[in-house]
């Protein structure tokens, strides 16, 4: 608990110090060997499907905490990524698609003192933040691996119902579900372009290249996401 409150209090102090829209200019995340950064939006009046959030409407401290938690999720995805195992599936053979193995390889906690909020902006019912994360040497080496070798770049879109994967889904469950679906789409797209015949299974690792963009469209949560993808194993149907 000792790590969480300083980050949150400094965030609140930052917002109170500057007026709304003080940081409305655009920024480029750019490239830095030691620092990664990104921006995100938090809704003060979140609605999921036909229900409102349990804490609706969010007070400022709750919105700030959620912004830090969400930033930590994305920094985790950029530095550590996920291990995946993908059963591609084929309707003609009666084999269902399965992307249930999607396991995080590490975590940046939202109270990590190396994560700081550098700028913020409040627009109507939304809070926008820019956050930086200063990596240690081991983390720098990890992120360099995502940018070299046989790692592929992929852009994909993920979807999730407004209420989330289950009726009692939290806002963070929804974020994770949309990211997972986008990762599935990214891996599937790479396999379609690289494999002449549809394989049965594939496994490997995937990470975020940048913070995703979330929005609502046609009754669904949608995220546009850039990934780094390392496919380590492809198993064709001929093996079976």
Image: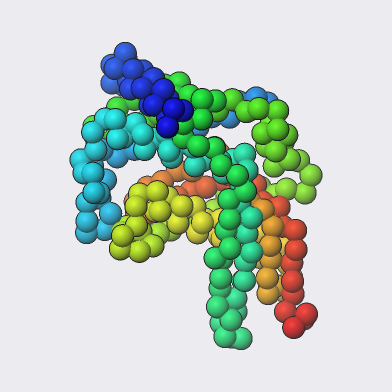
Coloration of the structure image: rainbow
Quarter-of-image position of residue 8: top left
Q: 55 above or below 33?
A: below
* Residue 182 % position (x, y): 52, 55
Query: Which residue is the extreme one toward the bottom?
Result: 93
Query: Which residue is the extreme one toward the front?
Result: 2
Looking at the image, which residue is at 40% across and 48% down?
Answer: 172
The number of numbered badges drawn on the structure is 0
Looking at the image, which residue is at 77% across and 49% down?
Answer: 150
Q: 222 above or below 98?
A: above
Q: Quadrant of the C terminus?
A: bottom right
Looking at the image, which residue is at 51% across and 40% down?
Answer: 74
Q: 135 above or below 103?
A: above
Query: For this view, does 10 lie left or right of residue 31?
Result: left
* Residue 75 % position (x, y): 54, 37
Residue 220 can be seen, yes or no? no
Looking at the image, which residue is at 69% across and 57% down?
Answer: 204
Q: Quadrant of the N terminus?
A: top left
Residue 8 can be seen, yes or no? yes
Query: For this view, does 151 lie left or right of residue 46?
Result: right
* Residue 203 % position (x, y): 68, 62
Query: Which residue is the extreme one toward the top?
Result: 17
* Residue 137 % position (x, y): 70, 28
Quarter-of-image position of residue 35: top right
């Amino acid at each position: 608990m000792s790590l969480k409150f300083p980050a949150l209090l400094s965030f609140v102090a930052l917002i109170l110090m500057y007026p709304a829209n003080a940081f409305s200019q655009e920024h480029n995340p750019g490239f830095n060997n030691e620092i990664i950064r990104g921006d995100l939006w938090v809704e003060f009046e979140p609605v999921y499907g036909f229900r409102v959030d349990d804490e609706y409407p969010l007070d400022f401290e709750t919105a700030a905490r959620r912004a830090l938690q969400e930033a930590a999720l994305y920094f985790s995805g950029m530095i550590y990524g996920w291990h995946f195992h993908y059963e591609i599936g084929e309707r003609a053979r009666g084999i269902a698609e399965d992307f249930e193995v999607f396991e995080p390889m590490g975590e940046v906690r939202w109270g990590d003192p190396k994560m700081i909020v550098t700028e913020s902006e409040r627009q109507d019912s939304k809070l926008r933040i820019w956050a930086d994360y200063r990596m240690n040497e081991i983390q720098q080496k990890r992120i360099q691996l995502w940018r070299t070798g046989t790692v592929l770049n992929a852009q994909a879109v993920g979807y999730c119902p407004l209420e989330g994967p289950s009726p009692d889904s939290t806002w963070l469950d929804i974020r994770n579900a949309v990211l997972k679906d986008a990762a599935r789409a990214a891996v599937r797209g790479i396999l379609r372009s690289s494999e002449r015949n549809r394989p049965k299974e594939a496994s490997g690792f995937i990470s975020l290249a940048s913070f995703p963009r979330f929005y609502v469209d046609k009754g669904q949560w949608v995220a546009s996401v850039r990934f780094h993808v390392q496919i380590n194993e492809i198993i064709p149907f001929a093996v079976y």
